[in-house]
Image (cartoon, rainbow, N blue to C red):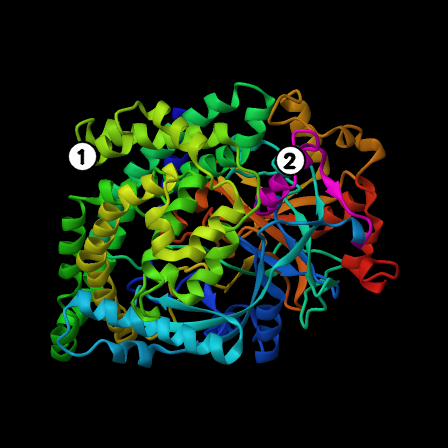
Amino acid sequence: MTRRSHLRIGRAVVAGICLLSFTLPCPVRADEGMWLLNQPPTTALKERYGFEPSAQWLEHVQKSCVRIGASGSFVSADGLVMTNHHVGYRAVEKLSTAERNLLETGFYAARHEDELKCPDSDVEVLWTIEDVTARIEAAAKPGMPPAGALAARKAAMTAVEQEAEEKTKLHCEMVTLYQGARYHLYSYKRYTDVRLVFAPEEKIAFFGGDIDNFEYPRFNLDCCFFRVYENEKPLRPEHYLKWSSGGAAEGDLTFIAGHPARTRRLLTVDHLKFLRDVELPSILNRYWRRESQLQSFAGRDAEHARIASGEIRGIANSRKAFTGTLAGLMDPAVMQAKIDAEKKLRAAVDANPEYKAKWADAWDNIAKAEQAYRGYYLRHSSLEGRRSVLQSSLLGFARHIVRIAEEKPKPNEQRLREYTDAGLKTLEPDLYTEAPIYDVLEENKLASGLSFFVETFGGDDPLCVAALDGKSPIARARELVSGTKLKDVAVRKQLVAGGQEAVSKCDDPMIRFAASIDKEARALRKRHEDEVESVEKANYAKIAAAQFATLGDAIAPDATFTLRLSFGQVTGYGEGDRKIAPFTDFAGLYERFKERKGAAPFDLPERWLNPERSVKLDTPFNFVCTADIIGGNSGSPVFNKAGEVIGLVFDGNIHGLVWDVAFTQVQGRAVAVDSRAIIEALRSVYNAEGLVRELTGEAGGHATR
């Protein structure tokens, strides 16, 4: 990102600050809220829009939506799933080769037999939700220290999952809400036979590239269609969303149902300061570093560019999103509003002797935990967790194999959560993937991580000395990648099946490397769980109880990558003296193409270069609405009161980047592909008439055959 674009994000956050909505101490305002399907915003919808969703409507929405890496939905009676191209990107990438690059050419299967099976892909449908808070809380006995209480709750969560899976044969997950105040059991139907039906070219799906990412107006056909199979036949889902014939108009009420990954609007001021001062700057420094390295790697030749493209896009997207969040937290007005809100809630607690005795210490306890974490955050996050700098696929396999060997002999409820019986079912598709692994990229990733450790902690650090084994980061990475046999799925399966004995005797260099760093990684994880996570869970539960007691429970919990419902209106916004209309159209796409002289990333696929012979130029292309979204909502359907698809969420605008920590709809917007654009492109550009008929329910579509 250039310095200019960094400042652009900062200005965008400031622009709407006077009307920010802060969830923590006050009732919800505007259209804020990523609502639980079993706790819908019925009152707000009825009062503001005169619409009251029925239980049947909510069930239909719930069982029509899917989790597919991010969000998606069933859109036909033949198991057709709609999501974004960028959500399906990895699947399309795995199906591509140097000779057949589907990201460049696009793909359409006119017949079921031409659909391409996607390796290690799955689709999950949320089937039931059960509130099990009482059982989980009962596991933490009075007087237990926070670390003991956390361990007891985790053991109870594992037991609940295991019992539910044995009883229902569904995939069951415990979901922690309000940072630990409530616990729900989510049970999913899971389908593992997923096949690609349609993907446009990357150039039109991501027109404008990183320059236009999080911007508006936009001109992206960011859609992708898959089909779910069961027993070698297209699935006949009980619920799916029908297609709207008319689309949306300005002012219309819209709904979005999807799987927002995470928000942090309910955090305390001291916790937000930790994000501002420690976590986000550290993450962004790593992203800037890694993005630069990958750009150099991709610049070597076309094949290097192809195999690195997905990682570059992912890092660039995250870097831009976190920059926006940090810009919000660096703004004094945002933090002052958070401070004022927290003071108000704490004053309400202090004014009631009963509340004060139970909850008044919660904020200070969290502050102490976050202060302590500052001392070892960098080392912990570098070595353990999803943002570890050691992100090699091969090393990831090795670390899982080493930990499975140690965890599996333990009683289920005593294992690390990702290695419980339920967790292993989720992990296995990734562990046993047959997706291609590129040695040259693996070496680059490992060398980057090893170099980071030396640069950050020093060449004499004991872990660095052991990890490098007397070699440079590049030489050590090459040695590990060239010497490992973990590229072979059969070898991975044999090691897992062989357990502790097989792993302890294994001389594979990647296994031995993973084992050498595991002791410290586990110790850091345990320290964080005991000193920070346990304190957060116990004390955020107190804060949530204080909220419920003083404000009621009409407050949506922070996002947890589980199904949520949000709502809002189709409406534009202003930027200074400029009015941004809610809709773009295909004519605007070609204007933008000409304005940028067709230079990448504003170039178009060959089949899009003659608009007069392709699309109707006045067809609405993209639009914005005020519904509340965040990362993870990509692929969510936008639908009307009748449950008809009117669009497909693929982004938020730059003013919505602060939504991670604070909501504003003055300028913040969700960005979607218009349903009419999808139909027009499928019909006029891709000659995908069978798919059009399936979506619209016309005779002759896939669903009628």
Position of 547 with respect to 101 (left or right) is left
Please state the horizontal and vertical placement of residue 82, each as a whole percent of the image: 66, 54
- Against 225, residue 136 (above or below) is below
Amino acid bearing label 2: Glu
Q: Is residue 1 visible?
A: no
Residue behind mark 1: 462
Question: Do the numbered discs 2 and 1 sit on residues whose CB atoms are within 8 Å?
Answer: no
Residue behind mark 2: 202
- If you read the primary sequence from the N terminus, does the residue marked by circle 2 or circle 1 appear first? 2
Magenta highlight range: 87-112
Say which quarter of the image contains residue 352: bottom left
For label 2, the SS is helix
**Identity of the residue furthest to the right in this view:** 700
Please state the horizontal and vertical placement of residue 72, each as a whole percent of the image: 60, 57
Position of 307 with respect to 323 (left or right) is right
Depth check: 696 or 237 in front?
237
Few, some or many residues within 10 Å of mark 2 (<14, 14–19, 20+) = many
Depth check: 214 or 473 in front?
473
Few, some or many residues within 10 Å of mark 1 (<14, 14–19, 20+) = few
